[in-house]
Amino acid sequence: MKKLVKELILVSGLARLNLGDFVKRVLALAKAATDNPLIAPDLDPTPAEVKTKADAITTAEGEKTAMKLALIAKTKFINTLKGDMTNIINNSWAPQAQLAVNGDADKATKLGWHIKGVVTGKAEVVVGMAADSHPIITKIDNSTHLEQTVCIMNSASGLVGVPKDASRLDVYQLKGGIIAPNDIKKMVNVGSASRGKFSCNFDIADLDKPVYYIAVYIDLKTKQPLEMSPVMSAIVS
């Protein structure tokens, strides 16, 4: 009886491997070819050339990781400066300029300030309710690992109490991204502040992400957003 010879087909085993295992597999093939030169002596490209390419991937991956870490550090640096500038403008310059202009809309406009509740320095169009204050995020404390505490005060009183026409102070949050949100519709309501503070806990997957916050007074009667703070951000650490 004639013997049947099954065709021998070689496969690399490279399919569906992650990059690390892919490189290990290529290096294993190159080493096996180098260790057994008499079996397949004329491989082209040579095992040494293939090993060089695999080593180049390993080197590039290390450089890529370093670039990612540098990007995270630079993003953190930018957000820190942005937070500092927001704090300076809102909490230092604004009260000083308010005293300096002494109710003069023209002076305020010349200094480049927006005027609450009016458009272009004129009172012909009133935006929403004529409230006398708004919430200000004075600090985001991230000294505790995977936790941030948002500290909020009233712009007029400098205290933590909400205005008489507000029922509570809600906190909206957005995790991740390099562009600060300008609309709470793009954010998540994470709860209400108590005595001017609100704490958030994060997962390890959130580490080094920027987190954006807006504090909002909620109208006592309509239960709708009344006045909002400028956006502030901090990095999860």
Image: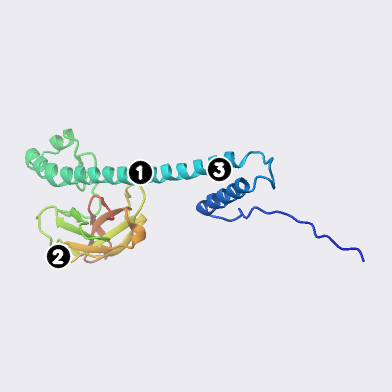
Residue nearest the viewer, comparing 52 with 132: 52
Q: Are marks 3 and 1 in contact (CB under 8 Å)?
A: no
What number is the disc on residue 91? none
Residue reaching furthest to the front? 38
Q: Which residue is mark 3?
A: 51
For the residues marked 1 and 2, what is the alpha-carbon distance in whole angstroms? 36 Å
For the residues marked 2 and 3, what is the alpha-carbon distance in whole angstroms? 63 Å
Image location of residue 193, percent across then percent down: 20, 64
Residue nearest the viewer, comparing 14 with 209: 14
Q: Secondary structure at mark 3?
A: helix
Q: Secondary structure at mark 2?
A: loop
Q: Which residue is mark 2?
A: 195
| Mark 1 neighbour class, 10 Å CA radius: few under 14, some 14 to 19, many 20 or more | few
Q: Where, quadrant-wise, is the C terminus in this rendering?
A: bottom left
Label 2 sits on what residue type? Arg
Q: Earlier in the sequence, mark 2 or mark 3?
A: 3
Q: Nearer the viewer, mark 2 or mark 3?
A: 3
For the residues marked 3 and 1, what is the alpha-carbon distance in whole angstroms? 30 Å
Give the quadrant of residue 141: bottom left
Label 3 sits on what residue type? Lys
Q: Are marks 1 and 2 in contact (CB under 8 Å)?
A: no
Q: Which residue is mark 1?
A: 71
